[in-house]
Image (cartoon, rainbow, N blue to C red):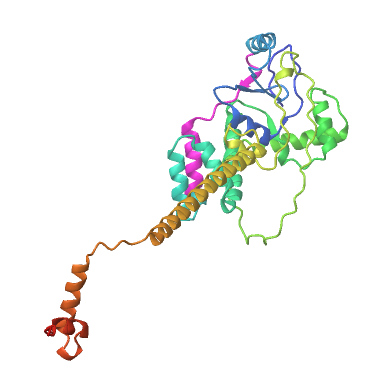
Amino acid sequence: MAKQISPSLPQAQNPLILRCSRIMEAFAKSDDERDFFLDRLEGFLFFVDCDKSQDELNALDNELKVFKERYVAIPKLTSYETKKIMEGFVNEKVYDIDTKEKLLDIIQGKEARDHFLEFIYDHLAELEKWQQYYQERSRIRIIEWLRSHSFDFVFEEDLDLPKHILERLKETLFETTVSKELSSARKTLQAKAKTYYSNEALHPRPKRGRPPKQVTKAEIEPQVSLDIFTQVPKSIRPFLFTPEISTSLGASFSSKFENEEALAATRRANLERDLEAGSIDDKLATLRKLSGHWKEESAAAAPTIDFSTDDDDEEDEDEEDEDLPKAKRAPAKAAAKKPAPKKK
């Protein structure tokens, strides 16, 4: 049973039903510009949105000061932790040497989280491994944090209860008398909540036995219960954090991308920019090729001018005739050497 937070507040009669995926997203998006909080009483999330009016911000600040023990601030992901997560994935899950070297270079550069995600989402062979690795690491980190603050909780993703039972449990969270069906469901939640405080929750054992056959997974839309909160203060309602369920949470690793659609839009913009740059290079290469052909044709069509004189031609002919035998010498020259007849 949950601990009593304040005498003026009601007491929960079963563990809080939290969504691990939603807390994972809040952990990733908590940065210098946004502060996230988790409520101890009902388990709702909210964050300080500076775009709200000053009156709303003042009311929220007053609520946080009055009920300090009720709201727990979610820690921010430091650059050191971010680097460790990326390096752990590269060293444990990436086997291609060239891909590993490229990712390690990205990790050491600026805006490593954003560039790391863009590279992973362009390599489908690593994408599925990254999503699974990131969710496993984030889940362990969230359980450690919840345990450190003595939360009595269960993750909705781990429950096999029907959707309408979960919604009824949320509605009757503070009621001491419920039906037999809900009473049995509460016992199930209490037994499940104890497993999160075991060693196996932080160090899950690998499954033994023969691995299952590779079967094509059918994409099924996850069934989640409605958000039902009955004790949300009026000052906190404008700041509630209730994002839609996402099947792929790898994109939430960077606070730059709100979701996977935002990451895909950034990748498309980068691709179009690269294509435009490539088309310009192709045009420049074509222009260079055309200019080269024009220079060659101009050089071939230019007339050649012979600056040699007639005397030079005669000397050349004399040199050629000297090399020939006397019988084959030019008759014109022989006639020229014959003396003219005397006049009578």
Residue at point 66%, 60% (across, down): 212
Image location (x, y in percent) of residue 170: 80, 28
- Which of the two residues, 130 or 320, is positioned nearer the viewer here? 320
Image location (x, y in percent) of residue 36: 62, 23
**Does residue 216 appear left or right of residue 319 in this picture?**
right
Residue 108 occupies which quadrant of the picture? Answer: top left
Residue at point 47%, 48% (across, down): 91
**Does residue 16 appear left or right of residue 197 in this picture?**
right
Residue at point 16%, 77% (across, down): 318
**Does residue 158 appear left or right of residue 77 in this picture?**
right
Tally the marks.
0
Tell me where the magenta segment starts and ends, as one range.
Answer: 68-91
> In the rendered view of the protein, which quadrant contains the N terminus?
top right
Q: Does residue 113 appear anywhere in the picture?
A: yes
Q: Does the magenta run of residues contain 96? A: no
Residue at point 60%, 22% (across, down): 34
Image location (x, y in percent) of residue 14: 75, 29
Q: Is residue 23 above or below residue 133?
A: above
Image location (x, y in percent) of residue 132: 61, 46
Residue 214 occupies which quadrant of the picture? Answer: bottom right
Q: Does the magenta run of residues contain 89? A: yes
- Which of the two residues, 318 or 125, is positioned nearer the viewer here? 318
**Does residue 15 appear left or right of residue 143 in this picture?**
right
Q: Residue furthest right?
A: 179
Q: Residue furthest bottom?
A: 327
- Which of the two residues, 61 or 211, is positioned nearer the viewer here? 61
Q: Is residue 76 above or below residue 308?
A: above
> In the rendered view of the protein, which quadrant contains the C terminus?
bottom left
